Image (cartoon, grey):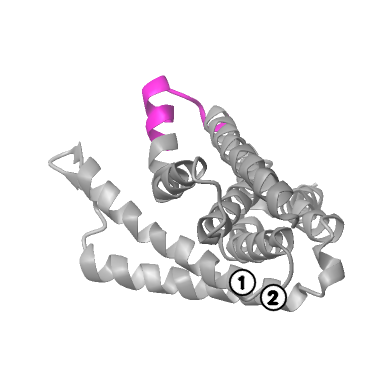
Amino acid sequence: MTLYHFGNCLALVYAPYHMAYKFSGISEYATFSKCVYAGGLYIFTQLCKMLLLATFFPDSDSKVDGEYDVFLEILKATVDFADLLGIYFALNAVPGKGHAKILTAAIGWASAEVLVTRSILLWVGARGSEFDWRYVRACAESNVSLIQHAASAALVWLWTRSDLPKKHAPIVVTLLALTPFRGLLEDAVGSILGLSAWALVSVRALHAAGTGLAALGMYAVLAQQIGI
């Protein structure tokens, strides 16, 4: 039963990533090495973020006299702009059409994240003697992260385009500016509405899907205009 639960969690985490790589068509572009490069950029970016947080926010306890310091958490969240910079470099390293750049950068970036953040958790926790839904929930969150990173990569790619329609530019900039604060906004909604853990995962999924659909719509319009 333990190995069965562990195997199910592994399949729930990694199967969508494999399917996204295999059936999206980017495997035909021989982009595996570029996915690895994007993953390496993710690890390097996280190390830089840790250094910045340790340098400018050495006190990780955001509670002062039992109160939650919202302003400090917002400042900490600005460090996540480094993720957008890392995705930008990952996009530039991939030759080919826009969809190949976006999917390669997103899958490589998200795969590195799930390896770093989920592998040890599943190996230590999901192999336990008792079934626990929190590991299934963590696997579901990793799939939501794939959608989030794909949306972020698409927005960064759109932002780099000089031929982006002017009416879309404010939308792209706004969505990019809100990206580092996505977690804070979702947690705030969950706290205000008193949502359960699974309901919060649903909120994250809806948020990621909404952002992704907006980015996909703008990409489709641009692709139709310039024939990419």
- Spatial CA distance of label 2 from label 1 is 6 Å
* Residue 132 appearing in the image: no
Residue under the image location 24 percent in, 41 percent down? 70
* Quadrant in the picture for residue 140: top right
Query: In the rendered image of this protein, does residue 3 appear above or below residue 44?
Result: above
Query: In the rendered image of this protein, does residue 208 appear above or below residue 103?
Result: above
Of 121 and 163, the residue lying toward us:
163
* Image: magenta residue range: 187-198
Q: Residue 108: horizontal and vertical position, in percent? A: 66, 66
Of 91 and 207, the residue lying toward us:
91
Q: Taking 206 as reference, is 15 left or right?
A: right
Residue that badge 1 annotates: 38
Residue under the image location 43 percent in, 29 percent down? 190
Q: Taking 143 as reference, is 210 left or right?
A: left
- Do labels 2 and 1 touch, CB within 8 Å? yes
Q: Indicate whether residue 39 is drawn in magenta.
A: no
Residue count near mark 2 (Cα–Cα under 10 Å), binned few <14, some 14–19, many ≥20 = many
Q: Residue 61: horizontal and vertical position, in percent? A: 24, 53
**Residue sticking out furthest to the top:** 193
Which labelled disc corresponds to residue 49?
Answer: none
Residue that badge 2 annotates: 34
Of 163 and 149, the residue lying toward us:
163
- What's under tag 1, amino acid-wise? Ala
Q: Taking 93 as reference, is 203 left or right?
A: left
